[in-house]
């Protein structure tokens, strides 16, 4: 045994044990902060808790969708610092909320405690349900026994009276009465046994019926946006101004017990519930306006969600196309977009939202609207521009103009926008992605705003009927249709023939052999079409084209989101201007520094050929001088007179 224990003790190396002990002591200084405000940031939290000591880590918990949980983990370097933080900050009001600060538990310990609590709660619930059923059964049984005893006493009294009155009664009659009474008692005993068996099922049905009745009768309401520190008694007092409140249930987290900010309130009368619903977003609870609405059954909520999903899936008005080409503030596509362009985009989006409130309007799949068109552009100029940038020829191309002629343009002044239509939706989508927000079309500061056109269904139907009528009366169009039909028939016949031939080949030889014999031939087996993924689309789309639409997802945005986008873009423009100013100042400072130091003149490097020429010339000159000196030394020196005769 001792050897086995020693072997177990030596499971980890000394370094591993040291590392584990260090990590254990490190975890002892980790604290958790609960009930935090959803507006808290890492910077604010660090500033608040750094006065107690050095913070090594600040981790604010978030859900998968990015929303705050209301909790954060803080890692201190020493135990004394974390103790001080817990003593001072636990129960302290921070950013309008009473926060709770405790030491964080290890993950394994927390999960174990969590499971134990769940088991305890389930056991308590089961015990409570059994107690309730037993008590109710006992009460019903006692009531029935009391009632039976009373009936028996009454019967006995009646019999005594009859005996006193009829002293001269016959024995036979008395015997008959006794037999009847015995039969009656036997029937009563059988009824009692049946009733003792039934109460549990009946009670369960009654409890369920009562729960249903509260919602069906309209006496129960659901309250949202409640403060987290409000209690049931306090809420009951506030809601009692509308009528008698039977019960208040505040929804809480299962493990932590923290309030979710919602509650159910059951009134005695339906009128009280209706009156409270009228005061939705008007009733103030701890400086917060509560939202009150009628409570629904779980089945009704699920049915409503299903109906919403079906409605989204159908989308007969193509509202999902409104998202195509949206420029979101802070995205790469918004870089370089002027403030006037962004404000015009958001204004047009708000206008389209207002137009689409009429259910007779829909988003066209093959027709586009182009804004920010220059005043000098004509229909032909717009057509050429589209062909130049997209290589697609539009079916309809029209720049909208005023009805009255103006100075310089007899056709009327341009309104700055136009309509373009294409034979297919795919072509229109590709054109939108290539032209929208493109800085090289009309210029950097006035980029084209391209979106799918909003049409009136009645006008669209009239236009289609008119087109069909004109085509029917046009003989050339009828000839074209006949020619197209003949071509289509020939194509289908040729396809059938090729298919038949391939099938005959396959009957003779297997596909593997045919592939070896003719490797260039396409395989006969049909490959299923791949679904378009977002990453594949992003490769095709230009960086300035904006957001991508997806069928089934609504593209309408609220006015609040649109105004937020405008503010965010304005903030980005201000930051870009500040950065531009800083960059210009740095460049100017660098230029001034160079000017003060003086520009150093750099000697020009001579060419290699020129250097070779100079060397050759130098060598040649030296050679000449050497020859002259050598010749002078060879000739005899004649002494001359220093005077002339």
Image (cartoon, helix red, strand yellow):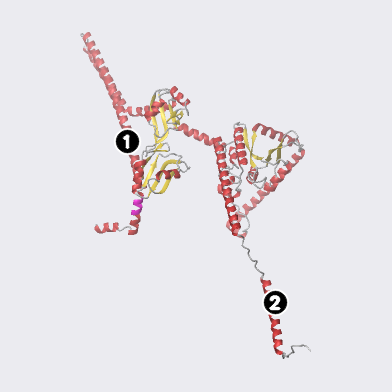
Q: Quadrant of the N terminus?
A: bottom left
Q: What element carries label 2?
A: helix
Q: Can residue 550 be seen in the rendering of this structure?
A: no
Distance from disc 2 to disc 1, alpha carbons, whole Å, reads 114 Å
Which residues fall within the magenta stretch?
21-26
Which residue is pictured at 23% across the width and 11% down the height?
161
Q: Can residue 56 be seen in the rendering of this structure?
A: yes
Q: Which is more N-terminal, label 1 or label 2?
A: 1
Which residue is pictured at 61% across the width and 39% down the height?
345
Residue 471 falls in image quadrant: top right
Q: Where is residue 66 in the image (x, y as percent from the top left)?
A: 47, 43
The numbered dot on residue 124 is 1
Residue 115 falls in image quadrant: top left
Q: Is residue 388 left or right of residue 324?
A: right
Q: Where is residue 25 in the image (x, y as percent from the top left)?
A: 34, 51
- Residue at mark 2: 617
Q: Position of residue 207 (x, y in %)?
A: 37, 28
Q: In this view, does 408 lie to the left or right of 95?
A: right
Q: Quadrant of the C terminus?
A: bottom right
In the foreground, 313 or 441: 441
């Amino acid at each position: 045994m001792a050897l086995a224990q020693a072997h177990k003790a030596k499971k980890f190396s000394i370094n591993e044990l040291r590392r584990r002990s260090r990590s254990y002591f490190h975890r002892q200084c980790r604290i958790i902060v609960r009930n935090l405000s959803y507006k808290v940031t890492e910077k604010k939290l660090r500033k608040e808790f750094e006065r107690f000591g050095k913070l090594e880590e600040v981790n604010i918990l978030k859900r998968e969708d990015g929303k705050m949980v209301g909790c954060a983990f803080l890692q201190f370097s020493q135990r004394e610092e974390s103790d001080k933080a817990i003593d001072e900050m636990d129960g302290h009001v921070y950013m309008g909320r009473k926060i709770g600060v405790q030491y964080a538990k290890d993950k394994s310990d927390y999960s174990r405690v969590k499971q134990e609590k769940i088991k305890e709660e389930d056991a308590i619930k089961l015990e409570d349900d059994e107690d309730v059923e037993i008590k109710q059964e006992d009460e019903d049984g006692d009531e029935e026994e009391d009632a039976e005893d009373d009936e028996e006493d009454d019967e006995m009294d009646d019999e005594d009276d009859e005996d006193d009155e009829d002293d001269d009664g016959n024995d036979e009659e008395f015997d008959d009465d006794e037999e009847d009474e015995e039969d009656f008692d036997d029937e009563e005993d059988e009824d009692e046994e049946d009733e003792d068996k039934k109460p549990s099922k009946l009670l369960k049905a009654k409890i369920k019926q009562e729960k249903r009745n509260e919602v069906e009768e309209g006496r129960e309401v659901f309250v949202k946006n409640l403060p987290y520190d409000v209690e049931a008694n306090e809420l009951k007092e506030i809601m009692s101004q509308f009528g008698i409140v039977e019960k208040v249930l505040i929804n809480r987290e299962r493990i932590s017990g923290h309030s979710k900010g919602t509650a159910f309130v059951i009134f005695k009368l339906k009128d009280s519930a209706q009156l409270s619903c009228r005061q939705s977003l008007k009733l103030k609870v701890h400086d917060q306006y509560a939202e009150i609405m009628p409570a629904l059954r779980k089945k009704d909520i699920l049915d409503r969600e299903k109906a919403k999903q079906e409605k989204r899936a159908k989308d007969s008005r193509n509202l999902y196309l409104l998202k195509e080409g949206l420029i979101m503030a802070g995205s790469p596509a918004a870089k370089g977009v002027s403030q006037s362009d962004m404000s015009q985009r958001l204004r047009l989006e708000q206008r389209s939202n207002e137009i689409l409130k009429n259910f007779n309007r829909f988003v066209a799949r093959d027709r586009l609207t182009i804004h920010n068109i220059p005043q000098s552009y004509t229909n032909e100029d717009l057509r050429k521009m589209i062909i130049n940038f997209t290589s697609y020829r539009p079916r309809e191309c029209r720049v909208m103009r005023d009805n009255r002629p103006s100075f310089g343009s007899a056709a009327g002044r341009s309104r700055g926008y136009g309509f373009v239509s294409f034979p297919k939706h795919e072509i229109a989508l590709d054109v939108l992605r290539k032209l929208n927000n493109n800085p090289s079309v009309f210029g950097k500061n006035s980029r084209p705003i391209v979106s799918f056109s909003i049409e009136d269904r009645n006008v669209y139907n009239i236009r289609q009927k008119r087109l069909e009528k004109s085509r029917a009366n046009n003989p050339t169009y009828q000839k074209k249709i006949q020619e197209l039909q003949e071509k289509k028939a020939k194509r289908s016949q040729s396809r059938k023939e090729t298919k038949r031939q391939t099938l005959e080949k396959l009957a003779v030889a297997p596909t593997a052999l045919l592939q070896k014999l003719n490797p260039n031939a396409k395989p006969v087996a049909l490959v299923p079409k791949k679904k378009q993924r977002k990453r594949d689309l992003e490769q095709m789309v230009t960086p300035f084209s904006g957001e991508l639409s997806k069928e089934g997802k609504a593209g309408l945005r609220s006015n609040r989101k649109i105004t937020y986008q405008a503010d965010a873009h304005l903030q980005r423009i201000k930051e870009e201007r500040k950065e531009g100013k800083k960059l210009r100042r740095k460049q100017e400072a660098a230029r001034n520094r160079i000017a003060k130091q003086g520009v150093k003149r750099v000697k020009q490097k001579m060419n290699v050929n020129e250097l070779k020429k100079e060397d050759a010339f130098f060598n040649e000159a030296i050679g000449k001088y050497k020859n002259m000196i050598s010749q002078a030394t060879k000739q005899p020196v004649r002494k001359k007179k220093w005077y002339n005769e």
